[in-house]
Image (cartoon, rainbow, N blue to C red):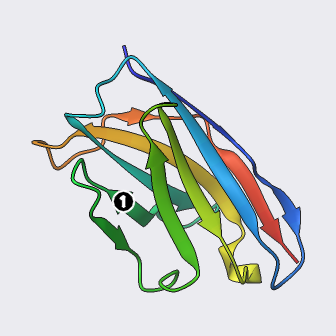
Amino acid sequence: HVQLVESGGGSVQTGGSLRLSCAASGYSSNTFCMGWFRRVPGLEREGVAGIGIDGRTAYADSVKGRFTISQDNSKNTLYLQMNSLKPEDTAMYYCAARLCASPEYNYWGQGTQVTVS
């Protein structure tokens, strides 16, 4: 059973940085692709960044050049380094996992709040 637990959210001023972490268990890093999503109340969930088992990454246009997704397989941990934060980055951030052979993310963490003011 895949479990994902996010941490690292908080409040930061515009231009600041945060690093989110996602501790994962019950999965194989050889078959699961990972991603970060965010959601603002009243709006649809937005994909922020993803990483494949080959290490290739993808980003939403809104965060390119500012956010970096990475993973440490030895620690079963996914990261999202967020720099140059803007108020529009304020959201609940979720870690997610999917079998790389599937297009849908089936496993989700509980979320961690990021507030930029």
| Residue 96 position by quadrant | top left
Q: Is residue 73 left or right of residue 6?
A: left
Q: Is residue 5 above or below residue 37?
A: above
Q: Position of residue 75 (x, y in %)?
A: 52, 31
How many marks overall? 1
Viewport quadrant of the N terminus: top left
Which image quarter: residue 18?
A: bottom right
| Position of 115 relative to 86 (above/below) | above
Quickly name the residue at label 1: 50
Residue, far top: 1
Please, which residue is most extreme toward the left here? 101
Q: Amino acid at mark 1?
A: Gly
In the image, is 21 to the left or to the right of 8? left
Which element is circle 1 on?
A: strand
Q: In the rendered image of this protein, does residue 67 appear above or below residue 75? A: below
Residue visible at 52% across and 80% down? 63
Lateral position of residue 113 relative to residue 104, left or right: right
Mark 1 surroundings: few (<14), some (14-19) or many (≥20) residues within 10 A: many
Rendered residue at 76%/52% (across/down): 9
Query: Eyeballing the image, is 95 above or below 115?
Result: above
Residue at (88%, 78%) from the top-left corner?
A: 117
Q: Position of residue 115 (x, y in %)?
A: 81, 65
* Image x and y of residue 5, in percent: 60, 31
Query: Measured from the top left, where is residue 105 in percent x and y?
Result: 30, 43
Which residue is located at x 52 percent, y 69 percent?
A: 68
